[in-house]
C-alpha cells in the first residue's frame, strides 16, 4: 500500500464534481487500499478520492478507537472502517447541530459547520455491492464532509468563523477532518 499525496485547493481536482465509480476492478481496490493507508498515516478520520487527486465518487472513513475517550465518544462506531462508493444522501434529520471541522486539504484551519445530526446514505461497498448506512453525530458529520468533497465543496465554503487552528487544538485534534471538539 502507498501513502498518497493530499492535494490542496490550488489543485482544481478538489473543486471538480467527481465521476461515478463504474468499475470495481483491481485498480480501484488499490486506490481504496491506498486511501485507507493514507487516512491512517495522516491520522485522518475521513478521506475522499478527490483529496488524492482522483476524481471518483468514493470515500473512506473511520472514527478512532485508540483511546478510552474515543471509545466512549464514538461507541459502537469507533474503529469501524467505512468504504462508500457512489454515495447518495437518502435521508437527513431535521435536527441540525454545529460542530468544529477541519480538513486534511486545508491544513491548520478549522471552522464551525452546521449539519443535520443524522443521515442515511445509500451507495456501494468496495466491491460494488449495494449498501445503506445510517449515521448520527460525528459519523454523520464525517460522511457529509466527505460527500461534499465529491461535489467539489470544501468546509470553508459553508463554515462560519474559519480560523487558524490553535496549537493546543492541534494537539487535541483527532484527525482529518480534524474535529477539534470531538475529544
Ligand atoms: Zn476534507
Image (tube, rainbow, N blue to C red):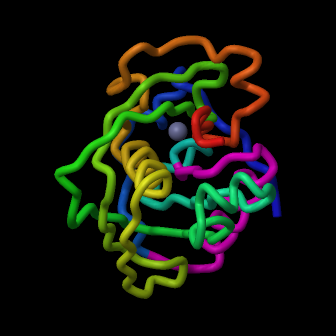
**Quarter of image, res 91:** bottom left
Determine if the magenta segment contains residue 26: yes
Give the side of residue 101 with respect to residue 114, left or right: right
Q: State the residue at coordinates (36%, 18%).
A: 160
- Rendered view: 128 above or below 138: below
Quadrant in which the N terminus appears: bottom right
Residue 163 lies, in percent from the top left, at: 53, 12
Determine if the magenta segment contains residue 159: no
Q: State the residue at coordinates (69%, 62%).
A: 71
Give the side of residue 176 with respect to residue 133, left or right: right
- Rendered view: 151 above or below 113: below
Quadrant in which the C terminus appears: top right
Residue 128 lies, in percent from the top left, at: 45, 83
**Quarter of image, res 140:** bottom left
Q: State the residue at coordinates (47%, 35%).
A: 14
Give the side of residue 180 with respect to residue 151, left or right: right
Camera-nearest residue between 33 and 133? 133
Image mark count: 0
Where are the magenta residues, as a range? 23-49
Residue 25 lies, in percent from the top left, at: 57, 80
Q: Residue furthest left?
A: 94
Q: Main secondary structure of the magenta part?
A: helix
Give the side of residue 153 with respect to residue 9, left or right: left
- Rendered view: 14 above or below 77: above
Residue 169 lies, in percent from the top left, at: 69, 24
Q: State the residue at coordinates (64%, 74%).
A: 29
**Quarter of image, res 52:** top right
Camera-nearest residue between 138 and 34? 138
Amino acid at each position: 500500500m502507498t501513502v498518497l499525496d493530499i492535494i490542496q485547493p490550488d489543485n482544481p481536482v478538489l473543486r471538480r464534481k467527481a465521476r461515478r465509480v463504474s468499475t470495481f476492478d483491481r485498480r480501484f481496490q488499490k486506490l481504496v487500499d491506498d486511501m485507507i493507508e493514507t487516512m491512517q498515516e495522516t491520522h485522518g478520520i475521513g478521506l475522499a478520492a478527490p483529496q488524492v487527486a482522483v476524481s471518483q465518487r468514493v470515500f473512506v472513513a473511520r472514527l478512532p478507537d485508540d483511546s478510552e475517550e474515543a471509545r466512549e465518544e464514538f461507541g459502537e462506531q469507533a474503529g469501524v472502517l467505512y468504504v462508500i462508493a457512489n454515495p447518495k444522501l437518502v435521508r437527513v434529520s431535521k435536527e441540525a447541530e454545529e460542530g468544529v471541522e477541519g480538513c486534511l486539504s486545508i491544513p491548520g484551519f478549522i471552522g464551525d459547520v452546521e449539519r443535520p445530526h443524522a443521515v442515511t446514505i445509500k451507495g456501494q461497498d468496495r466491491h460494488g455491492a449495494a449498501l445503506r448506512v445510517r449515521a448520527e453525530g460525528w459519523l454523520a458529520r464525517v460522511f457529509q464532509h466527505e460527500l461534499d468533497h465529491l461535489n467539489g465543496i470544501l468546509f470553508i465554503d459553508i463554515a462560519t468563523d474559519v480560523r487558524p487552528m490553535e496549537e493546543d487544538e492541534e494537539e487535541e485534534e483527532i484527525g482529518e477532518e480534524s474535529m477539534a471538539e470531538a475529544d
